[in-house]
Structure formats: structure tokens, C-alpha cells
Image: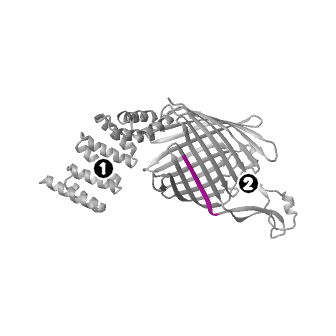
Amino acid sequence: MKAQTTQSVLDRANELVVNGRLEEAQTYLERFHRANPKEIKITIACANVAYQNKRYGLFMDLYTEAMEMQPNNYPIKLDYARMLFDVNEYETALPILEEYLTYDPVNIEALLDKAIILKSNEDFIESYNAVSKVLTKDPTNVTARDLKAELLVLKSKWAKLTANYSSNSQSFDVFAPVLEGGIYFSPLSSPRLSISPMLFQRTKGDNISIYRLQFDNRSYIKELGVASDYGAGLIMYPGTEFDVTARVRFEKFAERYILLTIGAERKPYFASVFSIDTTVMTHAASGSITLTTKESWNGKASLETVFFDGVDNPVTTLTGILYTPRLKFKDFDFKIGYGFNLSTSKLEKFASDKTPEQILNSGTSAPFFGGDYYPYYTPKNLLSQSAYFAFGYYPTIETQASLTVGYGLSGSAEKPYFFRDVNAIGQVYLSRGYVKENFTPVDVNFSVHSLITPKIEMNIDFNYSKNYFYIIRTLSLGVKVNFWK
């Protein structure tokens, strides 16, 4: 009689689910679960409906109850682990998969899920071992073959040469080849080294060469689920003047698709033509939240504050972008987005091209706008909003191309000027004012990445950016060689 009652409950719940009445099915099953907490079929059915309702906390609690009732029921463990995997609960899923594999060591689904989780934990060697077992049993498994090819690259030694060129409206060009290389030892040790001579070629004035050496390492701490990327380096300015660079960044996934990042960095500033002659070092603190769903909304919000050496004048920037789910058609995809940028400084470093005496002796209170920012740019209440259009093209698994265009919906900033002012008692003095100025921000990014041979990758990247201060164009051509066996 009890089995018949259980079956009738399951049949009724299934009917509700088939008709899309998930909440009603949830309530119905929970009532019978409370009345029969030891009936494992009701417990699992209730857990499965909770999963469909995205009530993941209840789903996990109910499956835990079911496994406690039947600790040797390995099919239940596999079902639970695979559902955990599907909602990115990797930390909970991995030990259950490993326990299941003691019962069925060559189960393809369990091995493949385990390999993907280990890859996300940056344990590339163990992930490679797991996916190799899949291919031993099923050599035609496309997912496993693609994953193995990716892991061969991730766990190999590599070297890359990149030629970088940039040109902007400040009348100087930059040529900066970068030679870098790295090796993977373990999740805790993945060091890399880069060397870069930078040539600044000016339309007016002498050319300047600056040299950079950087050593970095990446570590993934499995117990905390935190990745850290950190390093230090040297920079040599003309006249054999040296300075030190340093950086650290921490990454952690919160929930399932939300990546949290915080970081700090000491680095040189080269954004203005004056900073080439004047050594300007900065200390930057930053944080970001990134939404990384597979086929849904994606976006990122970030906050950065830059402090300049020896000056109490932080520049703070808040940016954000949100993309719609992508539309796919054969080898193409497309998505649209909205982005904003808000940036301001404590003090602005604008210097007039007139001397104070020239302004004071002008005999007029008309504004003097001429001048420049020295030695670095300091925005004042700069706000821009843009619409973004992103296109992707994937003709083969080895080649991907993308084009992103951002066009300003609005852009404004407070432009400084100097003027001659007179106080109430007739004294003349130099004063500063601001006028709101509108501009149209534009961003264009184009890239092609291709696997020329199984061991050689190539990338071409072009960027065009028009902001309130200047227009910049950059072009990069890179070739990377992976030394896997």
C-alpha cells in the first residue's frame, strides 16, 4: 500500500512538472516528504524539482539526505554530482565524482566532468590524466579530444614574441616588442618572464628608449578557491635611472557565474607626452565584478583609484558594461551592450600656455583655454555612455575573429581655463574656472586568433580609441610557440 501511495505521489508530481507547474509540484512533494522523510524516491523527486526551480540550497540538502539514507547507492551520487557540475558547484561536485570513480573507474561522464573541474582549479596535469582515460575508452569523444588539446597547451612550456605599435594625437609613436616565456609546474607555480624595450618616437624632440623586465607567477589555492597573480620587475629610464614595478591580483568566483577581482600595482605612467621625459610612477588599487554566464547576460563593473608618487592627487575611475545574450547564426554571433565611464581627480594638473603675468596683464576677464595637462592627465567629472556592438566569427575550431564597436551616446567633462579676476576691493588676481564640454567617445577593437599548427598560435589585435584627451591607435602582432610533447 505504501509503494502504491508513493507511486501515485510521483505520478501526480510528474504530471505537474510536465504541465510546467513547477512551484505547485514543489509544494506537493515537500508536503509528502515531511510526512515520509525516509522515503528516498520522494526525497529525490523533491530534490529534482527543487533543481528545476533553481532552489539550489534545497536541492543540495535533499540529495545529501538521500545519500545518507543509501550511502552505497552510487547512481544517486553520480546524478547528484553531475547536476552540481551543471550549476558550477565544482567544489562540492569534485569529491563526490572521485568517490563515484572508485566504484566505476572508467565512467566517461564522471571522468569528463572531473577533468573540466580540475582544469578550472588550474590542476592541468591531473585534468590531462582524467581526460586521457576518457579517450582510452572512447577515442572519438569530441569534447574530450578538444579538452586534451587545450590542456596540452596549458601545461606546456611556452614562448611568445609580440610586436606592439601605438600612435596617438599627442605627436609620439611607441614601438614595444615583448619577448616572454613561461612554464607550468603545478596549480601553485606557473612562472613567466617578459622583456620589453620601448622606443618612444616623437615628432618634436629626441627619441627615448625605456626598458622593462618583469617576473610573474600565478597560483591557485584549491582550499580557498582563490587564484593569485603576482610579480615584480625593473624599469630602466634614460641615463640608467632604475625603478621598481610590482603587482598582485586575487580572483575568486562567488555564486556560480560571478568573478570577484581585487588588485594593486606599482607601474610607470606613459599616457602623456610629458611623462616620457618625467619619471611618473603610480600606485593603483582596483576591484571588479564580472558576470560570466555561458549563454545569457554578461558584463563587468570595475573601480580603480590611481595614486601618483609624491602627489596627493588620486584619479578614480568607475566603469561598467553589460551585454545581452548573444544571437548565433552558423559561424557568427552578435550581441549588443551598454557601457559607461565616470572618472575624476582630486586636483587637476592643467597648465596654461600663458604665464600668470600675461593673463593678469591682459586687461580682460576672458577665459584662456590654451594649455596642457602636465605631466599626467587629470579628468574632472568626466562621464561617457556608449552603445556597444560585438560580432564574432568562428570559421573553424582553430580560428576566431571578433569585432567590437563602441559609439558614444553622450560624453562630457569639465574643461579648465584661467582668467583675470578682480575682488571687491579692486585687487587683480589669477583665477581658474571650468566649462562643461561635450565629446563623442568611440572605441573599435578587432582581433584574430588562429592556431597555425598544433604548437604555434598567432594573434592580430587592433584598437582605436577616441576619448576626451586624445585619440590612440594600437596594433599588435604576436606569435606563441608551445613546447608540449
Q: Is 38 contained in the magenta span?
A: no
Q: How is the image coloured?
A: one colour
Q: Disc 2 marks which amino acid?
A: Lys
State the residue position of label 2. 349
State the image coordinates of residue 307 (x, y, percent, origin top left): 65, 48
- Up-down: is 401 above or below 15? above
Q: In the rendered view of the protein, which quadrant contains the N terminus?
A: bottom left
Q: Is 401 contained in the magenta span?
A: yes
Q: Residues within 10 Å of mark 1 (few under 14, many from 20)?
A: few
Q: Main secondary structure of the magenta part?
A: strand
State the image coordinates of residue 177 (x, y, percent, origin top left): 67, 38
Residue 277 appears in the figure: no
Q: Residue at x 22, y 49 (%)?
A: 40
- Up-down: is 250 above or below 291? above
State the residue position of label 1. 61
Element type where label 1 sits in the image: helix
Task: Kindly indicate the quadrant of the structure image that contains residue 211.
Answer: top right
Task: Kindly indicate the quadrant of the structure image that contains residue 35.
Answer: bottom left
State the image coordinates of residue 344 (x, y, percent, origin top left): 65, 57
- The Cα atoms of the two marked residues, 1 and 2, are separated by 58 Å
- The magenta span reads 400-410
Q: Residues within 10 Å of mark 2 (few under 14, many from 20)?
A: some
Which residue sits furthest left? 1
The answer to which of 170 and 278 lies nearer the viewer is: 170
Residue 92 appears in the figure: yes
Which residue sits furthest bottom? 424
State the image coordinates of residue 485 (x, y, percent, origin top left): 50, 29
Q: Disc 1 marks which amino acid?
A: Asp
